[in-house]
């Protein structure tokens, strides 16, 4: 994600406690992303480029621009782009992908077949620049093989950042973001020229990209009927209240027998007991029964 | 092979490993009501290599809540308590019987001990998490729960290897493969050894029932070891081919603990599982301490 790295210590102006609180609250209200006091530097770092892009002298001006400026809604989108991007790659956290491949997918496909259905629905919630949903699509394709054509597969991929989504739509990646992926899969599912790897259409067409703000609970409640949901490293940005509400919506979004995967180092222990915790080799997931 | 054939064969084996006499006496002494420090210390001192190992383990990072080195057995007994010393003696000596006889010569032996030590360490942490009053015995139990596998490997080698491979191919528990191919399981064989050696009853119980803790007598101890066994397998310490995907709250060990009033639901099993990712170092250092060899990876 070359375009999301912000040079350290760029801003000339430093963020006052007051500005920090104003901006933090504004971001939280509009995106649910919560910057605790300990993350002040991180926020400052991420917003410094927005200051520069808008030619502003300090963070207070930036805050006024977000609140009252004529370009308000455009800038809010840019703000979401800056605060939501996080590092991601294909086959990130291999044990989780392995668990999807070896256990969860087999299980949900079997359940669907028992009900005489050949539909598969997955959701990559917080898909960033697309590595995760395309990874899911590759795993599904590898699992179903030729039978894929008999299945109605849809992987919904949503994010709050328009910029991340359009990058996902381009579906072009560099070798670095493919580093954890077996060579054979790179060869099968990407068109490679130089350092650029473009996701092939057979994979791309399984993924449907969509703008979604998790604060918008009405829209989120429309997300329904999923067999598997990936929501990795998203909850860490939320505060407790939103985390609880959103996780219960994730629960509702799954069909019985469905699985939720969250970030490798995240836990729902203090958020909900609705799910059953499932242990896989080197990975955890949550099952709705 | 049938069960009877295996049993008969085991009966006849003359070089079946034996527990050093001193150790048997320590175990008997530990179960008597009027055990005292002097007797215990005296007995351990009769076996200098054992005494040295006990002291080494007592100085391992886990016990090192003390500022100074523990430099004598008597101090170790005072600081760690007699019960813990008996735990250490039992683990160290049973493990030594097998480990010293040529490490790595058995089938996937290193992987086996890693699984056992990891199970012991996880059991100990889990017991602490539950504030279970199992007094460190869950560690000994975790360490020795699969001891029967060594006997199967040593005396029925090719059948045991066949069972191991069968379990990998069919993703079934090793004990199921054993019972199919050998007609007997590592639990039964291990239990026979525990009886023969006069190991404490709780150990026999763990060895026999760690795959069905609801049948155990020492229920919480066996349940804790059974869960630690699962977690070790889901981590990096599997031995055998069982599918290591499970819902913890559906496991009988979990339900046993729940029924006994342990607040299992309050334990953050996600964090616990993640923290157990780091047992590797402790596993290595324990094996090194007990065997005197390094557990090179
Ligand atoms: Fe076992
Ligand atoms: Fe085991």
Image: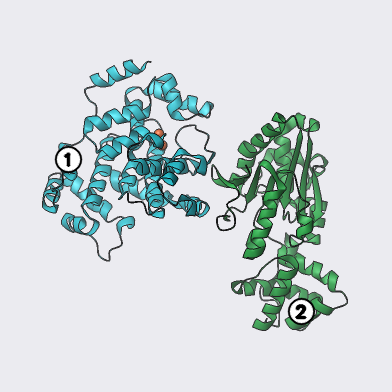
Chain colours: A green, B cyan
x and y percentages locating residue B86 in the rendered image: 22, 47
Which residue is pictured at 35% across the width and 26% down the height? B152
- The image quarter containing residue A225 is top right
Circle 2 SS class: helix
Labels 1 and 2 in the same subunit: no
Q: Nearer the viewer, residue A39 or B129?
A: B129
| Inter-mark Cα distance, 1 to 2 | 76 Å
Pointer 1 chain: B
Image quadrant occupied by the N terminus of chain A: bottom right
The answer to whether B224 is drawn above or below residue A240 in the figure is above
Where, by quadrant of the figure, is residue B65 drawn?
bottom left
Q: How packed is label 2: few (under 14 Cα within 10 Å), some, or many (20 or more)?
A: some
List the residue tagged with mark 1. B28
Residue under label 2: A63
Question: Which of A168 and B30 lies nearest the eye of the viewer?
Answer: B30
Q: Report the image quarter containing ligand 1.
A: top left
Residue B275 placed where, x, y %? 47, 54
Q: How crowded is mark 1: few (under 14 residues within 10 Å), some or many (20 or more)?
A: some
Residue A147, horizontal then vertical, whole percent: 76, 29
Which quadrant would residue B66 be assigned to in this image?
bottom left
Residue displayed at 30% across by 20% down: B7
């Amino acid at each position: 994600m070359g375009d999301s790295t912000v040079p350290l210590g760029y801003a000339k102006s430093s963020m006052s406690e007051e500005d920090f609180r104003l901006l933090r609250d504004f971001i939280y209200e509009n995106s649910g992303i919560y910057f605790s006091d300990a993350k002040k530097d991180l926020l400052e770092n991420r917003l410094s480029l927005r200051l520069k892009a808008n030619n502003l002298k300090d963070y207070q001006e930036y805050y006024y621009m977000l609140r009252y400026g004529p370009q308000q809604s455009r800038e809010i989108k840019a703000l979401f782009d800056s605060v939501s991007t996080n590092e991601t790659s294909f086959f990130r956290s291999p044990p989780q992908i392995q668990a999807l491949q070896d256990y969860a997918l087999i299980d949900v496909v079997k359940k669907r077949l028992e009900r005489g259905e050949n539909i598969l629905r997955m959701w990559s919630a917080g898909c960033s620049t697309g590595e995760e949903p395309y990874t899911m699509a590759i795993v599904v394709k590898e699992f179903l093989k030729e039978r894929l054509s008999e299945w109605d597969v849809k992987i919904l991929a949503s994010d709050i950042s328009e910029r991340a989504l359009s990058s996902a739509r381009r579906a072009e990646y560099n070798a670095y973001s493919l580093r954890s992926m077996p060579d054979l899969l790179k060869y099968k599912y990407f068109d490679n020229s130089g350092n650029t790897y473009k996701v092939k259409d057979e994979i791309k067409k399984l993924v449907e990209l969509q703008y979604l703000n998790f604060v918008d609970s009405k829209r989120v409640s429309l997300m329904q009927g999923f067999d598997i949901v990936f929501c990795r490293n998203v909850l860490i940005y939320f505060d407790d209240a939103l985390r609880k509400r959103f996780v219960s919506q994730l629960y509702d979004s799954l069909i019985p027998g469905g699985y939720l995967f969250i970030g490798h180092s995240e836990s729902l222990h203090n958020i909900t007991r609705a799910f059953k915790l499932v242990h896989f080799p080197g990975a955890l997931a949550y099952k709705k029964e | 092979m049938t069960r009877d054939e295996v049993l008969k064969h085991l009966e006849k084996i003359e070089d079946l490993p034996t527990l050093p006499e001193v150790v048997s006496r320590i175990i008997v002494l530990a179960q008597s009501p009027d055990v005292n420090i002097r007797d215990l210390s005296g007995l351990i001192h009769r076996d200098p290599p054992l005494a040295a190992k006990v002291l080494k383990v007592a100085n391992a990072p886990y016990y090192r809540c003390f500022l100074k080195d523990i430099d004598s057995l008597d101090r170790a007994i005072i600081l760690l308590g007699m019960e813990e010393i008996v735990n250490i003696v039992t683990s160290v000596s049973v493990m030594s019987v097998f480990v010293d006889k040529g490490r790595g010569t058995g089938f996937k032996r290193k992987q086996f001990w890693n699984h056992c030590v990891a199970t012991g360490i996880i059991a100990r942490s889990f017991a602490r998490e539950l504030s279970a009053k199992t007094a460190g015995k869950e560690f000994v139990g975790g360490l020795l729960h699969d001891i029967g596998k060594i006997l199967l490997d040593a005396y029925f080698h090719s059948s045991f290897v066949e069972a191991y491979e069968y379990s990998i191919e069919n993703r079934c528990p090793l004990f199921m493969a054993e019972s199919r191919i050998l007609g007997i399981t590592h639990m039964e064989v291990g239990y026979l050894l525990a009886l023969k050696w006069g190991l404490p009853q709780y150990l026999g119980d763990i060895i026999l029932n760690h795959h069905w803790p609801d049948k155990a007598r020492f229920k919480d101890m066996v349940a804790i070891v059974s869960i630690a066994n699962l977690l070790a397998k889901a981590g990096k310490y599997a031995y055998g081919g069982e599918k290591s995907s499970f819902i913890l709250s559906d496991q009988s060990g979990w339900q046993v603990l729940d029924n006994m009033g342990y607040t299992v639901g309050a334990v953050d099993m996600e964090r616990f599982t993640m923290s157990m990712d780091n047992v590797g170092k402790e596993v290595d250092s324990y094996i090194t301490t007990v065997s005197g060899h390094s557990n090179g990876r």
